[in-house]
Amino acid sequence: MSRAEPAARPPRGGGAAGPPLPSPGASEPPGTPAAPAAVGSAATPGPLPRHPSRTLGLFADEVRTTFRRRRTLALLAVLAAVPVLVGVAVRVETGDAGRAAGAGPAFMAQITNNGLFLVFTALAATLPVFLPMAVGVVAGDAIAGEASAGTLRYLLVAPAGRTRLLLTKYATVLTFCLVATLVVAVSALATGAALFPLGELTTISGTRIGFGEGLWRALLIACVVALSLVGVAALGLFVSTLTDSGIAAMATTVGLVITVQILDAIPQLSAFQPYFFSHYWLSFADLMREPVLWDGVGRDLGLQALYAAVLGSAAWARFTTKDVTV
């Protein structure tokens, strides 16, 4: 035996020497099954790469799960029923004594002349109460509902990562904001077309615009209303990371939304009201002026972005350090 080839050391315990270890880069014979890596060893593979298709798949799965829940479908059904009730009430009033003409909000007084105004009226009626409550329920259940059902741990075991899971949940809630707003708008448009005439409409400024332009502005208003709920979605997501009870998170989020709306109506708090996420919600009415006034809408969207950044960062800081035991 030469010096260049030292004798192989016997294994500890006096057993026979095992087969020689393959050198790095050596190929195994074809058909040889790979030995499973030990759990916790250095050979354990790390998380799978976060390919965009995996992120889209996770988002699609969350959207399907959210919109298949009976609670979500019930919320959308209630939102769709509000424009129908408003349209029928206005129709009955005008058909009875014509008392609706010239009374009520600016949009309400125009419904009898053009059914498209029912879209604006329905959004104005649902935005202060129904839409925020629906978003609060879905957002509050995003993380806490998974923890309450015992599925959050399994989602984190999968190679998703806490940050990506949180962003996916938030994107799902924002999708619900858009869908809920469009449900109200489409239901109002169908009801308005069935009960009232359609055609050219008069803006708040008194100018006349065509029906196509009115449809475009209705879609724009619906998108602005959906973006106005970004702050509520971020609030609900943050609350959802603070508890493992979905019901508690939903109730807390809805309670905070109602509290903020009450504070926003107290004149003595006028110095603080411009910082409440609900303060500029009804500024979308400026989109029905000629020319369009963007100041209020810009303040609203800027305030929603601020709430999303602050509360979203707080939710991320809480969720990434949270001890998930269930």
Image (spheres, grey):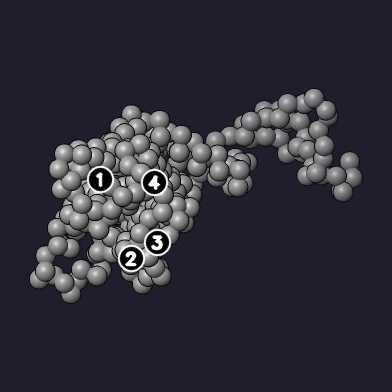
Is residue 75 at least partly visible in the picture?
A: no
Q: SS for tag 4?
A: loop
Q: Position of residue 130 (x, y in %)?
A: 25, 45
**Looking at the picture, which amino acid does disc 4 mark?**
Leu
Residue at the spot 40% in from the left edge and 34% down from the top edge = 67
**Looking at the picture, which amino acid does disc 3 mark?**
Arg
Residue at the spot 31% in from the left edge and 50% down from the top edge = 113
Residue at the spot 18% in from the left edge and 46% down from the top edge = 98
Give neighbour class at mark 1: few <14, some 14-19, many 20+ (Cα, 10 Å): some
Q: Earlier in the sequence, mark 3 or mark 1?
A: 1
**Looking at the picture, which amino acid does disc 1 mark?**
Phe
Q: Please state which of residues 177 and 140 is positioned toward the viewer in this rendering.
A: 177
**Residue at numbered disc 3:** 208
For residue 68, above or below residue 310: above
Q: What's the distance in space between the residues labelled 2 and 3, CA to CA?
A: 7 Å
Q: SS for tag 1?
A: helix
Q: Which mark is residue 198?
A: 4
Query: In which image quadrant can residue 82 be found?
Result: top left
Q: What's the distance in space between the residues labelled 4 and 2, CA to CA?
A: 17 Å
Give neighbour class at mark 3: few <14, some 14-19, many 20+ (Cα, 10 Å): few
Answer yes or no: do the residues labelled 4 and 2 have beta carbons within 8 Å?
Answer: no
Q: What's the distance in space between the residues labelled 3 and 4, CA to CA?
A: 13 Å
Give neighbour class at mark 4: few <14, some 14-19, many 20+ (Cα, 10 Å): some
Query: In which image quadrant can residue 264 be found?
Result: bottom left
Residue situated furthest right in the rendering:
2
Q: Earlier in the sequence, mark 4 or mark 2?
A: 4
**Residue at numbered disc 1:** 130
For residue 189, above or below residue 279: above
Answer yes or no: do the residues labelled 3 and 1 have beta carbons within 8 Å?
Answer: no
